[in-house]
């Protein structure tokens, strides 16, 4: 079930005891904090704010990620020119391998179907494909995206429902920072920030422990999708 901004803000106001007509924290203010919390999760744990999309390729080897992307997680397969029909799988490969075995790979004949992709973390908003694309193909990718600004209580949040709890803590942390001139305000802000951080760290650890890929063998950091 989708989580709405109001689901988080209502819980926040209950804890703040801020349900009076003249509210100390406005809806717009708390919604900004909620937006900050979503972006913080995306920055700390990119694999928690993801989107699977079918993306068109441009001519050549050098490709850029969608406008809302933060980083690339993986590329799965080709899609036909209609963007609907799945095709050949695509494998991650080291650039050094292609550079060594085929130095002219950037200038080879362009094709609609690509076999490999190369990702350089130093250029995190782009990737290369091989063979060079003719600009007619599509690929299916999974990427971390930058959540849109939350501006209304009826806005649907892109995060799974389980993240409602840490988002409440994050909004409370930011709200109590408003009273950071006082010791009590600082303590409450710190406590909620610690609760947020602990939840995210524990969630990430548990996901790693229960990852089905663990049964495939030791984690190989050079293989996309390997057990973590």
Image (cartoon, rainbow, N blue to C red):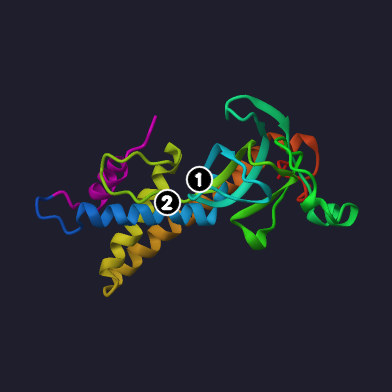
**Most foreground residue, 96 or 209:** 96
Contact (Cβ within 8 Å) of mark 1 with mark 2: yes
Residue receiving disc 1: 49
Image side of residue 89 versus residue 28, left or right: right
Q: Residue furthest left?
A: 21
Image side of residue 24 versus residue 155, left or right: left
Q: Residue at x 57, y 46 (%)?
A: 47
**Where's residue 140, x and y in %?**
62, 36
Q: Measured along the vertical axis of the image, is residue 172 above or below residue 190?
A: above
**Most foreground residue, 138 or 3:** 138
Q: Quadrant of residue 100?
A: bottom right
Q: Secondary structure at mark 2?
A: helix
What secondary structure predominates along the stretch shown in magenta?
Answer: helix
Q: Is residue 228 magenta?
A: no
Image side of residue 11 versus residue 69, left or right: left
Q: Residue at x 66, y 41 (%)?
A: 75
**Where's residue 228, x and y in %?**
70, 45
Q: What residue span does the magenta drawing correspond to?
A: 1-19
User: Which dot marks residue 38?
Assistant: 2
User: Which dot marks residue 74?
Assistant: none
**Most foreground residue, 179 or 131:** 131
């Amino acid at each position: 079930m989708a989580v709405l901004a109001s689901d988080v803000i209502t819980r926040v106001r209950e804890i703040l005891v801020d349900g009076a007509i003249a509210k100390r924290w406005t809806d717009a203010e708390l919604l900004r904090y909620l937006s900050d919390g979503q972006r913080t999760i995306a920055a700390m744990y990119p694999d928690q704010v993801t989107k699977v999309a079918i993306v068109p390729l441009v001519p050549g080897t050098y490709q850029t990620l969608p406008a809302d992307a933060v980083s690339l997680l993986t590329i799965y397969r080709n899609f036909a020119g209609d963007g609907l029909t799945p095709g050949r799988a695509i494998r991650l490969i080291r650039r050094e391998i292609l550079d060594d075995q085929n130095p002219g790979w950037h200038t080879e004949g362009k094709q609609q179907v690509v076999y490999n992709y190369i990702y350089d973390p130093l250029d995190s908003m782009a990737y290369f494909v091989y063979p060079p694309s003719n600009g007619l193909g599509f690929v299916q990718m999974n990427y971390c995206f930058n959540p849109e600004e939350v501006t209304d209580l009826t806005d649907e949040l892109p995060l799974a429902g389980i993240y409602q709890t840490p988002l409440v803590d994050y909004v409370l942390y930011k709200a109590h920072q408003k009273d950071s001139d006082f010791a009590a305000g600082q303590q409450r802000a710190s406590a909620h920030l610690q609760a947020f951080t602990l939840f995210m760290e524990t969630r990430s650890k548990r996901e790693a422990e229960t990852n089905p890929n663990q049964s495939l063998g030791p984690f190989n950091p050079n293989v996309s999708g390997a057990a973590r």
